[in-house]
Image: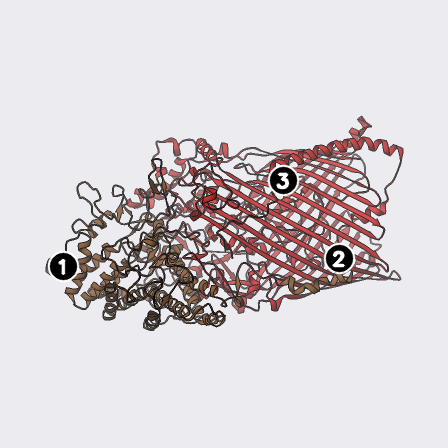
Chain colours: A red, B brown
Amino acid sequence: MFINIFRTNSPKNFIINEQTMRIIVVLCVFLLNFLSAAMAVQKVQSDSLLNKKPSEDTSKVLIKKQPAKLKGLQSVAVPIKSKFPANSIQQYLKGNVAGLYATEASGEPGTYQYMFIRGTSTPLITQEDVLKTQPLVVIDGLPVLSNESPFVYDIQRPDYSFNRIGPSTNLLAGLNVADIESVEVLKDLSKTAIYGARGANGVIYIRTRAGSTTSNMSFNTSFGVAAKPSVTTLNGGYEDSFRQRFYSRYATPVQLQSYPGFLRDSITTKYYGESSWADAYYKNALMYNADALMSGGSKRATFKFNVGTQKSAGNADETALNKYYTSIDLNIIPRSWITVSANIKGTRLDRSRNKYNRDRLAEVGYLPDLAEAPAPNIDSYNSFINEFNKGFDKNYNNIANGFLNVAIKLPLDISYNTRFGVSYNEGGRDLFYPSTLLDNSNYASNYFGLSQRLVYDNSLNYKIDLKSKHSFDFTVGSSIQWDQDQYSYSYAYKGVSDYLKVNLLKAGNFNSNGAFRDQLTFKFLDQTATNILSFYTSGTYKFKDFYSASLLLRTDGASNMQPVHRWFFSPVLSGAWDIKNHKLAKSPVISALTLKASVGRIGIAQLTDRISLGTQYASEAGWSNDLRIPSYLNTATLMRSYLYGYLGYDIPWSYNEQLSAGASFGFFKNRIVGELSFYSTTTKKQLINIPGAAEYGYTGLFQPGMDINNKGVDLFLSADILKSAAKKSFNWNSSINLNFNRNTLKALPGGISEIIIGDRKLQVGHAADQFWVLKNNGVYNADDEVPVNPSTGNKMTYKGTELKAGDPKWADINGDYNVDDKDKILTGHILPVVSGGWNNSLRYKKWDLQTSFYFNLGRKVLNQTMADRFNFINREAENSINSVKEFTFWQEQGNAALYPIYNPWSPVIPYRSEQDLFLENASFFKLRSISLGFDLTDKLLKSNKATRFKSFYVFASASNLFTITSYSGRDPELVNTSGIDTGYGLSLPMMFAAGLKVDFK
Amino acid sequence: MLISLLLPLLGCKKILDTGSTRAVGEVNMWSTLEDARAALFGVYALNRAAMSDNNRHVIYGDVRLADFEPTSRLDLKAIHNNMLNADYKLINDLSDWRPFYATINAANLYLERIHEVYEKDKRFVEQTYNLDRAQVKALRAFTYFYMCRIWGDVPLILSSHEGSFTNKPRDPQDKIFAAIEQDLLEAEPKLPYAYDGFDPEQTGLYYGQNIATYYGYGYLVSKQAVWTMLAHMYAWRGDYVNAAIYAQKIVDKTVRPSGSGAALAGTFRNVNDGLTVNVRYIGYMWGANHPAVLFAVARGELATSDVIEELTAADPIVPNRRIPAIYVPKDSLFSIYNEGTDARFAVDSVTKIVRSADGFFTGFDKPYPVFRKIFVPWFSFPNKQGINVPSDLGVFASPIVFSRFTEMGLLLAECKAALNDKEGAITILNQVRVNNSVPAYVSERDNGPLVDAIFKERRRELIGEGWRWYDYVRFKKIKNNDPKFNQLIQSGGIYWPVSRTLISQNPMLTQYPYWK
């Protein structure tokens, strides 16, 4: 929980000025261009003088940057060819890896995108649940910070937590996508176990471009546009006729009287005039990237230097993400037995966020009178933007990842590796809303958060080769990881003037800052530390090239676990049998066949340090609508965390128990290659907050014992349908990757069979990602259509309220003539049952054409956007955060004709969203990207011998071209992790880009 | 090399014992004076949280079948019409008693553990130990009383049941009232009249702070606060003999036994007593005005929601709010304030101009009159003309006042009337009436039944203070002439249903027949 302070804490600031960063990057790009040109010329001269060949051996040694590979399944690195202008790892990987499901809930660049490898091990109810299931991202061997810590949610009202306080930027947008050499998604224990508790949800291993012993320069750039979408806008006339259907049929005279003010006057043009807001709201937006790389070296040393910038843009609300990055990679071999590698990557992210009223008011934590809607004309939108721009909303992140690795070769085939790594992220949000946006009161807030990870790994490896038949490989290692997160946050209302914009984290009290009164200034800070310590040993035995077996034993200690359960022991056994080499060496059809299997378990540490405390006290003096109050009568308070839930002791590690088996194969001289694997992962003894103990003041009790199983198949198949080495021939490769996953809740704590948490029900035997809804069978047109209970003579009720004409016919599943939660059914899945991609690559002469398709099957979406539109009576009356209207209110977002006309005033709330009326099949098939490229190298070389380009390639691409789906809303991807389409995700823009890639010799 | 490999082993324990800076573990609690103070104020804060949460105090008392009507919110309309089975989020939240039980659990835990601080920290002296325990007992009793008024029978839990939270059924109210009575009677002798150091029960500075820190005389539980709790508990049960004893103590006690310190009682016309104070706390018993306490705003404790003004304030007192969420219709106002030129509220029937010194209501020219009696904007700002006007920003700081001097006076009048001491009742009633420029009550022949007159006066005086529903129930019980209402009492319809969520979590809980 937070600690509230009344004095300012000025955090350490390493903020690099945005402008300076921009200049540096631009200068660097130019410098590199110049250098590369100059070097290309020089190269021509030097090469002609000395026809020197680089030593193959050294470069091989140098490129090996990661720890010793373990044999296992899914070792196929993914060379992603798509020219999709990705700005994050998630976008880059989406639809390219079997078993990795990447969400994209908004087209706003830089927003959170969650990834799930082989389903979810926990029901996704809170933000913390989602973060618990995220995979580990390892870049060149360094496990990097990939998510902002969830502890800030402690001071956020759950119903206002649309965004995490602060920049809430996707940290994985911090990696330079152009720098990615290859990605390996590790899913089986045989591969992930080496990362211990951190890698329990799977590991995404990214290799960036390495240095080389030859001098190399490359430059690539692209320009493009995120295209303005075509939307149907609405005005007051439409809304009026939409509502008249309900008013004419059901409204009482009193209800007619309270017809909303903004629709009452049909003569004025404010609401009934043209709906032109979209002309300013949606725009074609420029995107670009420029990336330059220089590498070179000698036998004993190589380096890589990379610098670049990328601007990604959404097509709505002027959202954008600006990225400036640089990286340096050094490998030195001072003596033949020692290799030193160092790598540092730095990124600056600046994000322009959406300007939704809801998000603004949720941040402000204050609701004005919300009866009016914004007017749908362009002047109204422009004047809003004009006012908005009198303040500011600056969001930035500075991300740095770096490591130093020393590998030492000792006699007797012993090698020693030590690595020290740092992953660092600082993020800030500086916000000022002028008084014209909210009840004559301006609002300022400042956030500064800092996360830091230090990693110190050591390993010792010993190899024995016995008569080349038997070979052994032993490794022992240890790893320490220190994670630290902290933030300071302050907000204030009603500043003296719109021109006095002080930074609340730096300014003192009212007497010194003169802008914001102390009584209306709120300050928070919090910090948390999480450490993990691991020891492991592994041994691999190989018999010729036929069999291999390895055993890994590890023990992990985590500071987030309670002292009696600090440590967890995990064994993993895996084996492989190369049938091709062993038995089918002469087979003409089968060119490769290896069977692999692994079994074992791995511990999963808790996410927050609160768990390690057990029963605890915190300053939680607030209540559900106001969590931020820490004191009473100016006096500090301490109480049990009643709103968080009761935490006892003896909380064990939860762990994954995994069994997987599969085969990788190749046919017809590897023209068809692929991999098929089956898996069954049970995540056991998970801690879950079970609602209960209300008579003891708690919202719930944390109890261990939830088991969830994910079972499924990953398939990767790639075929060279047309393949020829001839110059003028046609080459066609087609590949498909897909995952089928089945999720089952196996057990709940204490042997109970079901629990209800808010709008979700978890029932043993069912999937943990199901919707829980009422079954809708139409409408009661007259009171006498409502069934009567023959035994009591009472009419059917909804939770005790009698159903009447105009109410929905909800199925009374248990037949007690009362529709309630017992009649809700578990149905559909939030996460897709089948997901995958289909990629094609065609090549003819110097031309190449690539397409990539992405699909989800067996997935549903709760269309809350439409539920909200129909439930306008309740939403407008309650003047809550749900009553907020956006400009997008005036946009057609679904098909209103699909829904029956109920009485919207009915106390049974006919248009409640938790019914299957709003649950839709959201399977889809998308053309994610298509690109056409042309290799100009030969032409250029022919025309001018002096230009020594190694390659010169130009391309054009189009992305997000079409979606085939039965979903009636905008896009089945624009949903949150609860499977709900709130209508707030910005559309994924259609993008067109053209660019070039140049390599210099 | 081997050393570096094994190096982590040496620092093992240190690396993994990070120690939280965010929360206090059980082992570190209950050891110092500061822990004791934080735990005590924690109980107070939880009580505030329970009563503030979703504006419970206002909605339970003044919206359900009461004078305040919702303008457009359907959830509030359902509550106003006693349709408490309707499936609105607000109704589900308000039928959940968890926040009250959080106060009770914190109190139970406090009473079980506080001796540890007394044993460990010498600074925690016996006087404070006894005094604080008495406050916590009174808060526990108050919370149970509050719950019994809402839900009738509730599970009686008097220990923390640490770690073994077994489901409990409802206990009969008599058993709960016995426990409340015991707690309050035990607490009363150990409490001071005020926390200003003049009483033997509390000498010197309280936790090193003078009384201004605690915003004066209403916000920590005093002897008088316990008397009001006892008086109301007895009155709710119909034991007017005992209720009269404690109400009488309040009305009589104007001078403190110590002879020094501020006076304890005010006059019978003091509508603002306790309501102009700019803090957001629970006034357990508001005695007299004290100049030291006005207009102090606690930093970090102001909020933008869950104060009565969130529901009641609108244009003209909050210019940007078109209409309030709840209001008292004009017709009701005419019938409530129907005697003479009431100082609290009166309207010239011809000119429609509000003529009232205190102005409980304003905006009478608009469709929805605005309740102004409790209106504590956090701060005033100079407007363009340089005149201080309330801030446009709807941040309010009104406290929840449980009882005040006039309220107790009218309760005493009610007791006396119920006990057939008509003369005594009329004397007190007329003090209130005369002070508010309402003609004196003469006799039942001239002015109608005395009990009716007393309850009408309560309605006028206490509007918006969360009394209306409970007054209505007591009135009906005294009259005992409405079979329909008696049926409501019989079937548990005067209580709130227990949240369906709670019943699904604790199958031992049952619903009253009326709500089945």
Amino acid marked by disc 2: Leu
Q: Earlier in the sequence, mark 2 or mark 3?
A: 2
Quadrant where the C terminus of chain B is found in the figure: bottom left
Question: Which residue occupies the foreground of this view, A937 or A475?
Answer: A475
Instruction: Single out the residue that lies furthest toward the top.
Output: A943
Pointers 2 and 3 in contact (C-beta within 8 Å): no
Measured in 3D between alpha carbons, the distance from the residue under mark 1 to the one under mark 2, in whole angstroms, is: 95 Å
Circle 1 or circle 2, nearest the eye: 1
The mark found on residue A323 in the picture is 3
Pointers 1 and 2 in contact (C-beta within 8 Å): no
- Left or right, residue A716 beside residue A50: left
For disc 1, the marked residue is B448
Callout 3: helix, strand or loop?
A: strand
Q: Provide residue A205's location: percent of width, then percent of height.
A: 70, 51
Vertical order, B83 against A57 (above or below): below
Q: Residues within 10 Å of mark 3 (few under 14, many from 20)?
A: many
Q: Provide residue A328's location: percent of width, then percent of height.
A: 73, 43
Q: Is residue B484 visible?
A: no
| Subunit of label 1 | B
Measured in 3D between alpha carbons, the distance from the residue under mark 3 to the one under mark 1, in whole angstroms, is: 81 Å
Callout 2: helix, strand or loop?
A: loop
Amino acid marked by disc 3: Lys
Q: Is residue A344 visible?
A: yes
Q: Provide residue B78's location: percent of width, then percent of height.
A: 33, 54
Vertical order, A753 against B440 (above or below): below
For disc 2, the marked residue is A70
Quadrant where the N terminus of chain B is found in the figure: bottom right
Callout 1: helix, strand or loop?
A: loop
Q: Residues within 10 Å of mark 2 (few under 14, many from 20)?
A: some
| Subunit of label 3 | A
